Image (cartoon, rainbow, N blue to C red):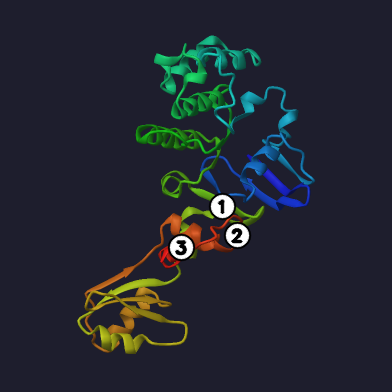
Amino acid sequence: MIEARNLTKDYGDKRAVDDLSFTVRPGVVTGFLGPNGSGKSTTIRLILGLDAPGGGDATVNGKHYRDHPAPLHEVGALLEARSVHSGRSAYNHLLSLAQTHGIPRGRVDELIDFVGLHDVADKRVGQFSLGMGQRLGIASALLGDPSTLILDEPVNGLDPEGIHWIRNVLKSLAAEGRTVFVSSHLMSEMSLTADQLIVIGRGRLIADTSVDEFVRQASGKLVRVRSPRAAELSVLLAAPGVTIGETDEDGLLEVNGLSPAEIGDAASEHAIPIHELTPLQASLEEAFMTLTRDEIEFKPLVDVEKKDEVAA
């Protein structure tokens, strides 16, 4: 379990983490999301004791990271996969880590095979592709068979097969009762991998909830309605707090502010036939963009939708 309580961190006059509190529990994959500059990497560094907080505290499995006598057995972390001596082979890199904790060579051999680096185990890491470096970083995190995993952008550089592989690995580790905390910018992948979400912006907590609830919160009440008497239905549904958008397709409306049941009941009461009644749910990416819109620190100077006007 990871616990952050009122974490605060300043760099000069910039507050990177602002009174941040959350708990990452075992048994589920918890995604850690936020726009660029939101404080995700700083938060992870605070949890691992790489930076000292200006206020608050963070513990892993009930202790500060530095207080674990054999930390690789408690916490496996991937922050920057390429921070490896470029002249070492993948095998020797893992072996040197293993020897600091009395981990046998057999475990190194096992992980080399597990992450798919058997054919390049003796190759210098400086010659690795980004994806190969990621696999080595994942192997390093798993080396001590830890109960807690903290991975920052683990799918970065992986091909589709590798992404599918790490997704299944993370889910299986969580199913074993481990704590799995994963930071990523790939919303489509998080929607397939994570069960819970912790979302921050400008160093502050925005959401600590399940993926389903996060998406539902952003989706609101948006329903697609198809009827041969759409114009009549539109007039019937009009009310304060309800917006009705017409589409290019005849007989199709998008109603925001009423549930499917409320729309269906109103149509039935006036004998208006309904051919479709579909609640529309935002994707995780759309939900993330909606709920973090005001927390983006680095914005383009020109809106993408207006770039053609500027160019003209």
Q: Amino acid at mark 1?
A: Pro
Q: Amino acid at mark 2?
A: Glu
Q: Residue at x 61, y 17 (%)?
A: 97
Q: For the residues marked 1 and 2, what is the alpha-carbon distance in whole angstroms?
A: 7 Å
Secondary structure of the residue carrying tag 3 is helix
Q: Nearer the viewer, mark 3 or mark 1?
A: 1
Answer yes or no: is residue 127 visible.
yes
Residues at circles 1 and 2 in contact by the CB criterion of under 8 Å: yes
Residue 204, given in percent of the width and then of the height, sits at 66, 55
Q: For the residues marked 3 and 1, what is the alpha-carbon distance in whole angstroms?
A: 20 Å
Q: Is residue 62 above or below residue 208?
A: above
Q: Earlier in the sequence, mark 3 or mark 1?
A: 1
Residue with the mark numbered 3: 216
- Neighbor class of circle 3 (other Cα within 10 Å; few <14, some 14-19, many 20+) is some
Rendering quarter of residue 312: bottom left
Q: For the residues marked 3 and 2, what is the alpha-carbon distance in whole angstroms?
A: 20 Å
Q: Amino acid at mark 3?
A: Arg
Q: Earlier in the sequence, mark 3 or mark 2?
A: 3
Q: Residue at x 22, y 85 (%)?
A: 229
Disc number at residue 295?
Answer: 2
Secondary structure of the residue carrying tag 1 is loop
Residue 114, given in percent of the width and then of the height, sits at 43, 21
Disc number at residue 35?
Answer: 1
Report the side of 106 relative to 55 (left or right).
left
Residue 129, given in percent of the width and then of the height, sits at 45, 26
